[in-house]
């Protein structure tokens, strides 16, 4: 697992470094080389990889796998998405296609899709983790291909998601927070009965 996390960080930092120098070139390449069939395919990944899609998919997966409430994932997801939201409104970077068209929409940096996907990566187990990694990479590729994000946006989003997930997971193990949250959810369930 440690090697898996280190690899994720190394890859994210390499992509961030490439993006710092070649963001505009990569975005222009995607904007100028659109394919209608590939665009429809990328729409599917962009739809499934948005915050709500990731939240639903991973919650169902964790309920089915562990048979208990995935509080640690929800917490990691929520914190990382909140940080991403704050950065988006603070930095207010235009999306690549906004610069080309002049049309105003919400902000680009960092990618919420990448943050959502990578905040879930740590909570996947065994082969599902590799499938989720491939899915996550397709999601972030789709966001660049569609002109919604630069490479630095998706690399930073992935770093935020992965880092917050690691911190939350560490805190849950170190301070035995799972036991505390299980007690709280049982009390809440008793109140509903």
Image (cartoon, helix red, strand yellow):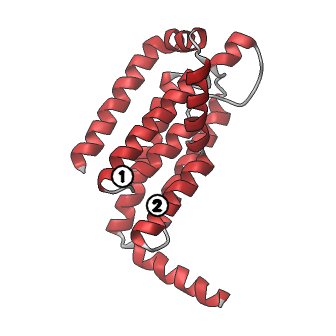
- Image location (x, y in percent) of residue 38: 55, 23
Q: Report if residue 109 is visible in the image.
A: no
Seen from the viewer's position, the closer of residues 127 and 189 is 127
| In the image: residue 193, left or right of residue 101 | left
The answer to whether marks 1 and 2 mark residues whose Cβ atoms lie closer than 8 Å is yes
The answer to whether residue 32 is above or below residue 42 is above
Residue at left offset 66%, top offset 17%: 97
Q: Residue furthest front?
A: 37
Which quarter of the figure is the C terminus placed in? bottom right
Q: Residue furthest right?
A: 103
Seen from the viewer's position, the closer of residues 137 and 159 is 137
**Number of marks in picture:** 2
Q: Report if residue 132 is visible in the image.
A: yes
| In the image: residue 59, left or right of residue 92 | left
Mark 1 neighbour class, 10 Å CA radius: few under 14, some 14 to 19, many 20 or more: few
| In the image: residue 81, left or right of residue 151 | right
Q: Which residue is mark 2?
A: 61
Q: Which residue is mark 1?
A: 128
Q: Residues under labels 1 and 2: Cα distance?
A: 9 Å
Q: Residue furthest left?
A: 3
Of callouts 1 and 2, which one flags the residue occurring earlier in the amino acid sequence?
Answer: 2
Residue at left offset 38%, top offset 41%: 133
Seen from the viewer's position, the closer of residues 130 and 100 is 130
The answer to whether residue 22 is above or below residue 114 is above
């Amino acid at each position: 697992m440690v090697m898996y996390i280190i690899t994720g960080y190394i890859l994210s930092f390499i992509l961030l470094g490439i993006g710092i120098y070649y963001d505009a070139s990569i975005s222009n390449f995607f904007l100028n080389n659109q394919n209608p069939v590939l665009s429809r395919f990328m729409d599917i990944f962009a739809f499934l990889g948005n915050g709500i899609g990731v939240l639903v998919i991973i919650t169902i997966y964790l309920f089915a796998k562990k048979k208990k409430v995935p509080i640690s994932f929800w917490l990691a997801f929520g914190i990382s998405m909140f940080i991403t939201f704050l950065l988006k409104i603070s930095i207010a970077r235009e999306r690549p296609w906004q610069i080309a068209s002049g049309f105003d929409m919400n902000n680009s940096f960092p990618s919420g899709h990448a943050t959502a996907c990578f905040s879930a990566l740590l909570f996947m187990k065994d082969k599902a983790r590799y499938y989720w990694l491939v899915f996550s990479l397709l999601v972030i590729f789709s966001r660049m291909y569609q002109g919604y994000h630069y490479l630095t946006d998706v690399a930073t989003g992935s770093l935020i998601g992965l880092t917050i997930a690691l911190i939350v997971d560490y805190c849950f193990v170190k301070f035995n927070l799972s036991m505390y949250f299980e007690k709280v959810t049982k009390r809440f369930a008793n109140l509903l009965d």
